[in-house]
Image: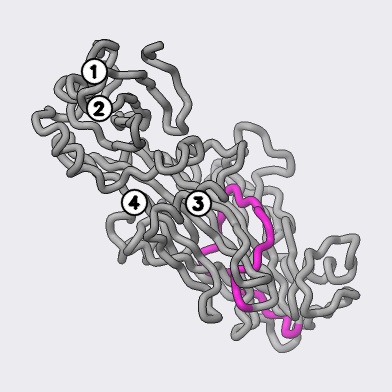
Amino acid sequence: MFRRIELKAARNNPLLRMVCLAGFLSLFIPGPGQATVQQTSDKPPEAFHWLHPASDPKLWKEILQKFNEELTPDQATPEANGIDVYGYKYLQKVGIFDHSALVIVGHRPAKEVSKDNAWNVHYSAFNLDLTTGRKSSIEHAERLWQWKFVKLARFGPTSAPDVTFTYLSCTECEPDSMFSSFYYDGEKSAWQMRPWGDGKDLWWTASDGLVVELDIIGDGNLTFFDCVYGILNSQDAGFQNLAMRCKEFTEIASGESTVADNTVVYGISGGQFKARHVTDASEAVRLTQQICKPNMKSFLCRLKGDASVTAGQNEILKTVFPTAPVTARDLADFPSISRTMTMAEVANKCGLPDELSGSGYYTFTYHLRDGSFVHFTATGPEGRILDANHLDDKGYGMSLFAIK
């Protein structure tokens, strides 16, 4: 089965990552005898709008005719054995701006999707010039698994909004969940997939989107990855920003660890769409609070204020607990902890904590290999343990014990 190449396979090789994600670009150029597609909508041509069969039946029918080849159902063959055979194809969304149409084509094994084949649904994006009738596939958008429209957003300098969406990087695999958008390129008069980075500085920023969630099972030494992102109003009136914060934990060698905590804001700067790395921890916390909503299942959203800022404290912990052994990475190593012990005694038994946060009351965090955590709260290294909790990767869990 054809699969979209996973980002994780090329994550540590930026050049390979860019090649793998470049995708296959196919162009369908109309011949000289083909008719153009005429816009008949009563909306002004410069206003973006979604096209529906009822809003403009004539234009909808003409677009169906232009995409007859892409919408023709696959025919099952004995050799295919049902794999990569899509018996139902349809126009999922059509957006109109100026003389260009953004066309999203859906592919399903059958019209009615069951639980058994829900995984095998993907979408392809095309640009259609309504003046010339020329259509072309959008690079990096040939197969977007489980594509879902999010909202319209004003990121760029053009009067057309971005069409933001989420999708999965592959199917029948451990996929990366991606956030991306289509934007209208005024110079080319065509829709394109917005680039977010090259993966060199931050691996989770790529030409085809931002990695917002991933399955860490089998992903090397990475045992924790949590991201929050949201579309926020910009200081430039009429525009919006995309703010994203990701925190990751990696076990590097013999129990030692690193914590990376990065926040990036994408938006208009000097008339161009750019990424800005946030270096002020207080701004990162403020943006996190603006992004987080009550229904978000994110560890970063469950932490209060500065408690989420813990990166770069390995040297402090080494100084505080100089004789700590190799850090424990399994929950089975912690139940023998007594509530009468001090945090220093815990460290001498279970190893160096991975993170430290708080003021007055401190939280010492251990990352386990299954992606969960053990949190100890104490007044300091020599203070008695006030409580201990085992939490999953979203911050939910149970108390191992608590002092009342």
| Type of amino acid at the residue the image marks with label 1 | Asp
User: Is label 1 in a helix, a strand or a loop?
Assistant: helix
Q: Earlier in the sequence, mark 4 or mark 1?
A: 4
State the scheme by which the image is colored: one colour
Q: CA distance from mark 2 to mark 3?
A: 32 Å
User: Above or below — where is 349 with respect to 366?
Assistant: above
Q: Nearer the viewer, residue 110 or 387?
A: 387
| Residue lying at the far bottom of the rendered structure | 32
Q: Secondary structure at mark 3?
A: helix
Per the image, the residue denoted by label 3 is 286
Q: Which residue is mark 2?
A: 329
**In this view of the protein, can residue 81 be seen by the observer?**
yes
Q: Is residue 208 above or below residue 282?
A: below
**Which numbered disc, 4 or 3, marks the residue closer to the eye?**
3
Mark 4 and mark 2 lie on one chain; the one further toward the N terminus is 4
CA gap between label 4 and label 1 equals 32 Å
- Residue 9: image tag: 4
Distance in Å between CA atoms under marks 3 and 1? 36 Å
- Kindly check if marks 1 and 2 are in contact, taking CB atoms under 8 A apart as contact: yes
Give the residue drawn at x 56%, y 44%.
292
Q: Look at the numbered discs 3 and 1 and tell me whether their residues touch, using CB distance below 8 Å.
A: no
User: Which of the two marks, 4 or 2, is nearer to us in this view?
Assistant: 2
Q: CA distance from mark 1 to mark 2?
A: 8 Å
Give amino acid for label 4: Ala
Q: Nearer the viewer, mark 2 or mark 3?
A: 3
Residues rendered magenta in the picture: 131-157
Q: Which residue is mark 1?
A: 333
